[in-house]
Amino acid sequence: MTRSGPSRSGPQPVGPTPPGRRPDLDEAVETWSRMGDASLLRSVAAVILGFVVLTFGSVLTGQLLLRVFGEASGTALSAAFIAASLGGRGLITILAGFLTALAAPRAPRLHAGVLAAVLVFFSIASIAGLTASGDPYGPTWYPIAMLVMGPVGVLAGGALRPRRR
């Protein structure tokens, strides 16, 4: 299939765009149509894999740490528990970003970025829910720290993926 119109690396047209032509949108549609169904499914699966690892890893880490530190639900959490929780969940976010990038068919950092954006959305929803319920988990700053640390960890994990040759 040949491309019609200028390529990204070729000369760009000078002057107004002809009526009915939207270069950015047209190029995006053409790129989308060239993508194979398997590639698209693999992209979606890569982000879902990262999200599942992130979710289950975070829940399992939290449950394990509650048992190890002997913390009871509804009581004030110790500083050691909070530090271990931040560290453990930080490692989980790095692993999730790495696995997302590893499973991506192309543009691994972009896939990790999509997972980071999904994480930001759910983190903000979680903070809103905790604020509305009046039942915070740990200190007030903890969910905000996770909001910042989570996406950074996912992006760092995505950057750890070795380049394909």
Image (cartoon, rainbow, N blue to C red):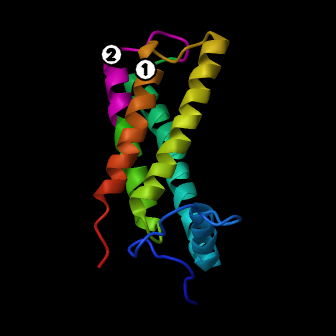
Q: Quadrant of residue 81?
A: top left
Q: Residue furthest front?
A: 15
Is residue 107 at all visible to an observer of this figure?
Answer: yes
- Disc 1 residue type? Tyr
Is residue 53 at all visible to an observer of this figure?
Answer: no
Q: Position of residue 54 (x, y in %)?
A: 49, 45
Q: Is residue 39 left or right of residue 97?
A: right
Q: Residue furthest right?
A: 20
- Crowdedness of circle 1 by 10 Å Cα count: few (<14), some, many (20+)? some
Q: Is residue 41 above or below residue 119?
A: below
Q: Which SS class for mark 2?
A: helix
Identified at 57% across, 82% down, the residue is 4
Q: Closer to the camera, 133 or 152?
A: 152
Q: Closer to the camera, 109 or 77?
A: 109
Please, what is the dominant secondary structure of the magenta stretch? Answer: helix
- Residue 142, label in figure: 1
- Disc 2 residue type? Ala
* Residue 101 inside the magenta-drawn segment: no
Q: Badge 2 is on which residue?
A: 79
Q: Position of residue 115 (x, y in %)?
A: 50, 49
Identified at 51% across, 51% down, the residue is 114
Q: Over which residues does the magenta segment extend?
A: 73-87
Cα distance between the residues tagged 1 and 2: 11 Å
Q: Closer to the camera, 38 or 5?
A: 5
Identified at 54% across, 31% down, the residue is 123
Q: Quadrant of the N terminus?
A: bottom right
Q: Is residue 156 above or below residue 141?
A: below
* Residue 76 inside the magenta-drawn segment: yes
Which circle's residue, 1 or 2, is located before the other in the chain? 2
Total numbered labels placed on residues in the image: 2
Q: Quadrant of the C terminus?
A: bottom left
